[in-house]
Amino acid sequence: MDTTSDLSSMVRLNIGGKKFCTTIDTLTNREPDSMLAAMFSGRHAMSHQPNSGYVFIDRDGKHFRHILNWLRDGIPPTLSDPDSSQLLLEADYYQLLGLKEILKASRRETGEVEAELTRVDIIKCIQSERVRFRGVNLSGLDLSKLDLSLVDFSYACLRNVFFSRTNLQLAKFRDADAEGSIFHNAILRECEFTSANLRGALLAGASLQSANLQDACLVDCSFCGADLRSAHLQNADLTNANLEGANLEGANLKGAKLSNANLKGANLQRAYLRHVNLREAHLEGANLGGANMTGAIR
């Protein structure tokens, strides 16, 4: 039995510290236009870690096994909304177009009512000076990388909408239902999310300076590395939210619920935390310099 070719086609990957073994065929056949296929096409010199021989990719490895299984079998995983949102983000990064389309279609199917407009409709609308989508159902649409600054989405149904890298500065989301939506690396400066439902939304790396999130449902949200300087989070529900490494300098968290919230390594300098219950929050490595902690429960 000739094992030479099998061994030469093996690939060892280190994805953010998680290690995987696969083959070049798996990485290149099903999604030939993906970033992974390009990396291992033989056209590019790969940098391997000394001694181990692993190729390192600086991404979260949590969902990479689902990506490998998709590339092997062509069967997408069945995941909860937050995990599905995170996998969609990874599929976007690796440019796995087939997986992206299936995940988006699956998210649209879980919506209660079909979206009333399409991405093309939205693009036509934003060419006018003032745009309002108040109360409109846009569930499941891909609105990534558009300029939607100043748009009014108040009371709209925005479940599972893909807002990745979208400019939403000064947009209004008052009382909107944006459960499970993806705002990864979106510009959300001075946005209004008062009383909005963002349960399970992904806002990692988003720019939220001076955003108004008062009374918002932020349960299970991911704000990893997000910029929340001077954000208004009064009475917001941040139960189980992931704010690791987020910048909350000068943010107002009066009355916010932080049960099991992950604030490891977060910047909370000069944050307003009076009478906030921090007992169940994870604050390892957080910077609390100058924070107003009067009456806070620790």
Image: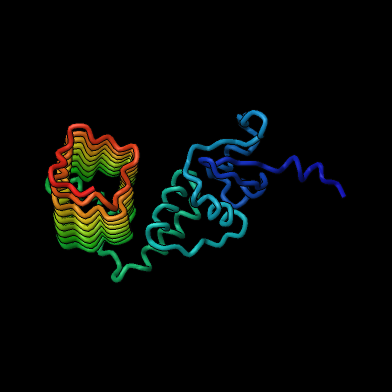
Q: Does residue 278 appear in the picture of this structure?
A: yes
Give the quadrant of residue 167.
top left
Residue 118: give x, y in percent of width and height.
Answer: 29, 58
Give me the residue at 20% from left, 37% from top: 229
Residue 88: give x, y in percent of width and height.
Answer: 43, 53
Residue 136: give x, y in percent of width and height.
Answer: 19, 62
Q: Is residue 214 above or below residue 112?
A: above
Report whether 186 appears left or right of 125.
right
Report whether 167 appears left or right of 11.
left
Report whether 213 appears left or right of 183.
left
Give me the residue at 66% from left, 34% from top: 52
Report whether 202 appears left or right of 5.
left
Q: Residue furthest bottom?
A: 112
Given residues 298 and 57, the one toward you in this image is 298
Give the quadrant of residue 146.
top left
Instruction: Report the coloring of the rendering.
Output: rainbow
Residue 254: give x, y in percent of width and height.
Answer: 13, 48
Give the quadrant of residue 51.
top right
Q: Does residue 152 appear in the picture of this structure?
A: no
Give me the residue at 57% from left, 39% from top: 38
Number of marks present in the image shown: 0
Q: Residue furthest right?
A: 1
Given residues 196 and 98, the one toward you in this image is 196
Given residues 7 and 60, the one toward you in this image is 60
Give me the residue at 47% from left, 44% from top: 60
Given residues 261 and 292, the one toward you in this image is 292
